[in-house]
Amino acid sequence: MRALLACVLLVVVCTVPAWSQCSIVLGDGEYLSAYLMTMFLSTLGPYDTICIAPGTYVLDPADGWPVVVPAGAPRIIGADGAEATVLVGDGSMYAFLLADGALGSFSELTFHGFGEPIYLADLLAETELEFTDNIVEHCQRGLRVLQHYSVVSRNVFRHNDEWGLTVPAVYVTVEDNEVCYNGHGINATYAYILTGNHAHHNDDFGISSSLGGDVAVIEYNLIEENGGSGLVVGTAGGSEFQHNVIRGNLYGVQYYLTGGGRGSFSLNDLYDNTLYDFKCESPGVGTVNATMNWWGSTDPAVISEHIFDCNDAPGTTFCVDFEPWCEDPGCDGGTPVESSSWGLIKALYR
């Protein structure tokens, strides 16, 4: 059997020289066999690669979809660019289910019209996920990352009904994704690293982070033109929010202090948000460090008008310390600015 399989693989690889990384190529551009996908997922190993030929494949549950990805399964990749590999669902189904112990690795695939593209075969399954260079579009829900220590990188999540990307797992890296025109953007409950993402034109928030006591790095994200808040922060722990551009949203940062540390906001651009650039939500006690940011102005009165904190809600002690601030976008070469008179005015209210 292995000798026969080796012959099959050799023939396929030789006939598709551009895909030299492929152990096997499945699909004829119109039909993708769930039976063959299942067979090769269980026969090949983690260092092998299943390639799906360019084309548009309507996956039929009657044909055996979704397919279960077992432990030790190979990587699954498609074709990108002008000749893409597009998998089409029926509006409610999954494409793949990850079994216990599986490392699901998916690249250069377009998932169109699924309930969700990937889920767990067993809710108690312990898995990991590598999801890179894919497109998830027009699904009920985008990608749900239930796998700890996963990587979600360089994907596009667009026009999904409920969310683009949601991450209830811990220690997940989310980087360089575009998340747009979804119900909401990235719900990164416990993601460890969020960097380089572009969250824009979502109906609700761009990015939401509720990190508990964990330390996370949220930096170099462009969050703009979302119908709700650009960035929603729950308990921030010791997290760092740096080098983000947050503009043109309903609120820039909407901050809920529910316990734990308060995080640190610095070297961000927060400006031109409709209601407030930074809004503290009650209950909350203490001061949020939001010094060394660009607020679209160097006038402390103008900056303060776009911050909602203890100065605007009498009886509360949830405050934002925004000085010194930067005098130009990105704090690039600018001199930190602090107004002693404004500091005195703030002190009278704290």
Image (cartoon, rainbow, N blue to C red):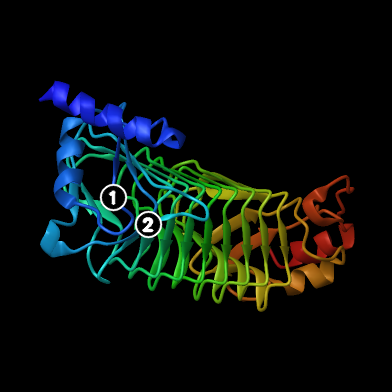
Q: On the rendered image, what quadrant is the N terminus found in?
A: top left
Q: Is residue 43 visible?
A: yes
Task: Return the residue at label 1.
Answer: 27
Which residue is at a point 73% across and 72% down the rendered structure image? 272
Q: Nearer the viewer, residue 202 or 38?
A: 38
Q: Are marks 1 and 2 in contact (CB under 8 Å)?
A: yes
**Residue 67 at what x, y percent from top left?**
18, 50
Q: Quadrant of residue 3?
A: top left
Which secondary structure, mark 2? strand
Q: Counting residues from the N terminus, which is met first, the one under dot 1 or under dot 2?
A: 1
Label 1 vs label 2: CA separation?
8 Å
Q: Amino acid at mark 1?
A: Gly
Which residue is at a point 22% across and 26% down the rendered structure image? 7
Judge the density around disc 1: few (<14), some (14-19), many (≥20) Cα neighbours within 10 Å. Answer: some
Q: Nearer the viewer, residue 349 or 36?
A: 36
Q: Amino acid at mark 2?
A: Gly
Task: Return the residue at label 2.
Answer: 55
Q: On the rendered image, what quadrant is the C terminus found in?
A: bottom right
**Residue 337 at what x, y percent from top left?**
87, 53
